Image: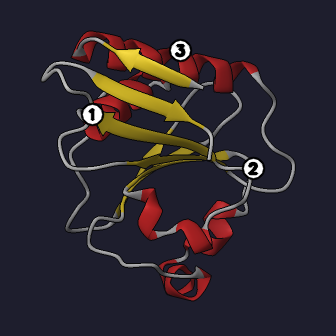
Amino acid sequence: MRILSSSLRTTKALAVMLAEEIMRRPPNLSHATVIALQGPLGAGKTAFAGSFARAFGVRRNLPSPTFVFVRRYPLRRGRYRNLFHVDAYRVRNTTKKFLAPLGLIDDLGNPRNVFLIEWAEHLKRALPSKAVRITFRHSKHAHERILTFGK
């Protein structure tokens, strides 16, 4: 599915709608729920991530974890226990072996976790096949973005 977002406000609203839909569903039985955001700089991934996290109850601003790779936010309500925000900008085409020393393999295997991954195209070989993939692209108009849901 492709959506043309005509503003930052629309992009943020889409993030909230997706978060609310995920919160309504029971957790996946075999692994964490993974939202894989991909696309170029300035396409709206971080704005989307911040609104998604707020919808899940994260009250702090979501700083980019670029230099720490991952931040964990405990969730206090609902079916999910943790939201992990990952920024894979500095990672290149890696596998699960890279994630193991970080403890993320166990976290990805826990159905009570949600992963929000920016630059997910750099981790594609390490992500579950059922990850929700969203590709962000710039439109020909400066304020518009194209979001494509799916592979």
Q: Nearer the viewer, residue 67 or 150?
A: 150
Q: Amino acid at mark 1?
A: Gly
SS category of the residue bearing label 3: helix
In the rendered view, would you say 78 is above or below 38?
above
Relative placement, left or right, of 93 versus 69 is: right
Q: Amino acid at mark 3?
A: Met
Q: Residue at 24% x, 13% y: name it.
A: 7
The location of residue 72, given as percent across then percent down, is: 43, 53
Q: Residue at 73% x, 58% y: name it.
A: 129
Q: Quadrant of residue 133?
A: top right
Q: Residue at 34% x, 48% y: name it.
A: 39
Q: Dot 2 corresponds to which residue?
A: 111
Q: Quadrant of the N terminus?
A: top right
* Label 1 packing within 10 angstroms: few (<14), some (14-19), many (20+): many
The location of residue 5, given as percent across then percent down, is: 34, 16
Q: Dot 3 corresponds to which residue?
A: 17
In the rendered view, would you say 104 is above or below 37?
below
Which is more N-terminal, label 2 or label 3?
3
Q: Dot 1 corresponds to which residue?
A: 44
- Check if mark 3's residue and mark 2's residue have beta carbons within 8 Å: no
Q: Amino acid at mark 2?
A: Pro
Q: For residue 72, which numbered disc appears in the image?
A: none
The location of residue 132, given as percent across then percent down, is: 62, 42
